[in-house]
Amino acid sequence: MPDFFYSVVFYLFGLIAIASALAFVTRKSPVAAALWLVNTMFCLAALYVMLDAHFIGAIQVLVYAGAIMVVFLFVVMLLNLGHVGDLSDIRGKGGRLVAGLVGLGLLAQIMAMARARTPESLMRLPGSAAAELHDLGAVGVVAKPLFGQYVLAFEVTSILLLVAIIGAVVLGKRRPVA
């Protein structure tokens, strides 16, 4: 019985994530689209947690649903996007037809990948990776290279993001009317 309940909840979160993603791409209002994207991110985090990837689920919520969506909403507010009718990216029936064909192609690719069997050799971790995962844990495996080998790139990226935020504030600041 617990396996059936687990499967039902897992597929329920999957369906909600797909429905939220479809709602995200069909909204004309950027704020409504952002809220649907947040719902998609929470559903994906729940799926990660159900797959025993708790760290990835937490990062999904913190980084994507938290930080990136806040930045997205700040950009929407700074740009003051105006009329809803001007927000559509696809103009005319030709663009919609191309978008539909691309969507069908992606759906066919997902279905083909779902039918393909993953080779057993890809499912097993090499001996050194399995030992490192056992010794350091899931967070340690990610943190060791991030704060060791790649610490300079990590810090430069944080400075670059800080400069981008300051630049967005300066560009978005309204000049007083004389």
Image: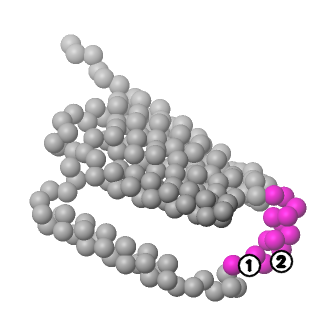
Q: Position of residue 111 (x, y in %)?
A: 43, 78
Residue that mark 2 sits on = 127
Q: Position of residue 114 (x, y in %)?
A: 49, 78
Q: Position of residue 53 (x, y in %)?
A: 68, 58
Using the rendered image of the protein, determine whether residue 51 is visible from the camera's viewpoint: no
3 relative to 137 in the view: left or right = left
145 relative to 173 in the view: left or right = right
Front position in the image: 153 or 22: 22
Task: Kindly indicate the quadrant of the structure image that contains residue 4.
Answer: bottom right
**What is the magenta segment's predominant secondary structure?**
helix
Front position in the image: 39 or 11: 11
Front position in the image: 125 or 10: 10
What's the residue at 22%, 45% (across, down)?
Answer: 87
| Residue numbers of the magenta segment | 123-137
In magenta stretch: residue 127: yes
Q: Position of residue 76 (x, y in %)?
A: 34, 36
Task: Specify the amino acid type for callout 1.
Answer: Arg
The C terminus, quarter of image = top left
Residue that mark 1 sits on = 124
Task: Specify the amino acid type for callout 2.
Answer: Gly
Where 3 sits versus 104, above or below?
above
In magenta stretch: residue 16: no
What's the residue at 52%, 47% (across, down)?
Answer: 42
Q: Label for residue 85?
A: none
Where 111 sits versus 142, above or below?
below
Where 37 sits versus 175, above or below?
below
Cα–Cα gap, marks 1 and 2: 9 Å
Task: Kindly indicate the quadrant of the structure image that contains residue 138.
Answer: bottom right
Front position in the image: 146 or 115: 115
How crowded pointer 2 is (Cα within 10 Å; few <14, some 14-19, many 20+) is rated as: few
Task: Kindly indicate the quadrant of the structure image that contains residue 97.
Answer: bottom left
